[in-house]
Image (tube, grey):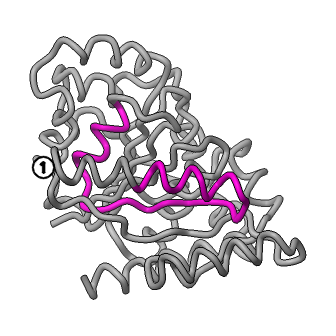
């Protein structure tokens, strides 16, 4: 059965999409069967996987409104080596349409259960706001992976996210837990980042992943070529870190 993980952080610009795309490709390189779900109307994870969001015949929007199933809507990211449930601007309208529907926060969960046997991992790229889309992701997941920069404001955003996860756990999804915190865009030359990193480890202990993803220009360049960074430049520091993170996640899941 697939392990379903949300990549979420209520703070924008912390590398959620970069983390999701490169983790999916890293897991595929490790021989895992992966489905990535793009729940962000911007569709950046879709484009970063080499799929033109404007050309999608069916998307996660259709799955949420139950006009298509996951097998009908998924496409293959040949460059990434994983399956993708893509997103585009249509998804922004789903917010409004879902409000009036029954089981509005459980629709993605029901759709993914039908393909749980097809995959080892399902990764969900959530939008930066706490919306009905994010709620669908959290209700579908066994756990949350939190990418964060080691900066002061990021700590405040993290406490908000942890409270949200506790509320969803208590009211909607008893399986949901924080799987781990991934330190991204890390620059060891900046004293504050090292201090925040130590604070994270002191407060969250083994919930902080051992892998640290450095700030890396090759990871930032990769989406413009429609490729995950681990495929675009496998020898770059960022790519090496994400491959190591994928392997660490596989080990951590096996120990759960």
> Does residue 114 appear to the left or right of 95 in the view shown?
left
Name above or below for residue 252 compared with residue 83: below
Question: Toward which corner of the image does residue 145 lie, by quadrant?
Answer: bottom left
Check the picture and name the quadrant holding the N terminus. bottom left
The picture places residue 46, in percent across and down from the top left corner, at 51, 39
Q: Can residue 184 be found in the magenta stretch?
A: no
Q: Is residue 240 visible?
A: no
The picture places residue 79, in percent across and down from the top left corner, at 55, 54
Name above or below for residue 254 compared with residue 10: below
Say few, some or many: other residues with alpha carbon within 10 Å of mark 1 (under 14 / 14 to 19 / 20 or more).
Answer: some
Q: Can residue 139 be found in the magenta stretch?
A: yes
Magenta region's main secondary structure? helix
Between 222 and 16, the residue placed more toward the observer is 16
Instruction: Tell me which residue sits at (46%, 60%) in the image.
Output: 81
Instruction: Tell me which residue sits at (72%, 45%) in the image.
Output: 225
Instruction: Tell me which residue sits at (65%, 77%) in the image.
Output: 212
Check the picture and name the quadrant holding the C terminus. bottom left
> Does residue 220 appear to the left or right of 175 in the view shown?
right
Residue pointed to by mark 1: 113
Question: Toward which corner of the image does residue 182 lie, by quadrant?
Answer: bottom right
> Does residue 186 appear to the left or right of 143 in the view shown?
right
Q: Is residue 199 visible?
A: yes
> Does residue 165 appear to the left or right of 69 in the view shown?
right
How many numbered circles does the render carry? 1
Question: Toward which corner of the image does residue 199 lie, by quadrant?
Answer: bottom right
Name above or below for residue 212 compared with residue 124: below
The picture places residue 240, in percent across and down from the top left corner, at 66, 78
Q: Give the residues in magenta.
A: 133-162
Q: For mark 1, give the secondary structure.
A: helix
Instruction: Tell me which residue sits at (55%, 28%) in the image.
Output: 42
């Amino acid at each position: 059965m697939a392990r379903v993980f949300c990549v979420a952080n209520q703070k924008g610009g912390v590398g959620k999409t970069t983390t999701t795309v490169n983790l999916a490709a890293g897991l595929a390189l490790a021989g895992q069967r992966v489905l990535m779900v793009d729940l962000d109307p911007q569709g950046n994870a879709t484009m970063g996987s080499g799929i033109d969001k404007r050309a999608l015949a069916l998307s996660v929007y259709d799955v949420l409104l139950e006009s298509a199933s996951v097998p009908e809507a998924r496409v293959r990211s040949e460059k990434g080596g994983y399956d993708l449930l893509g997103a585009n601007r249509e998804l922004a309208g789903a917010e409004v349409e879902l409000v009036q529907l029954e089981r509005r926060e459980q629709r993605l969960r029901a759709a993914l259960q039908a393909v749980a046997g097809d995959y080892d991992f399902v990764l969900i790229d959530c939008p930066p706001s706490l919306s009905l889309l994010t709620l669908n992701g959290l209700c579908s997941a066994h756990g949350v992976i939190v990418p964060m920069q080691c900066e002061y404001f990021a700590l405040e955003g993290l406490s908000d996210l942890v409270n949200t996860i506790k509320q969803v756990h208590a009211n909607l999804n008893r399986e949901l837990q924080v799987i781990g915190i991934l330190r991204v865009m890390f620059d060891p030359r900046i004293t504050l980042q090292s201090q925040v990193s130590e604070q994270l480890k002191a407060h969250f202990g083994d919930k902080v992943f051992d892998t640290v993803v450095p700030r890396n220009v090759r990871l930032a360049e990769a989406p413009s070529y429609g490729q995950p960074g681990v495929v675009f430049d496998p020898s770059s520091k960022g790519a090496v870190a994400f491959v190591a993170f994928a392997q660490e996640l596989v080990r951590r899941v096996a120990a759960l």
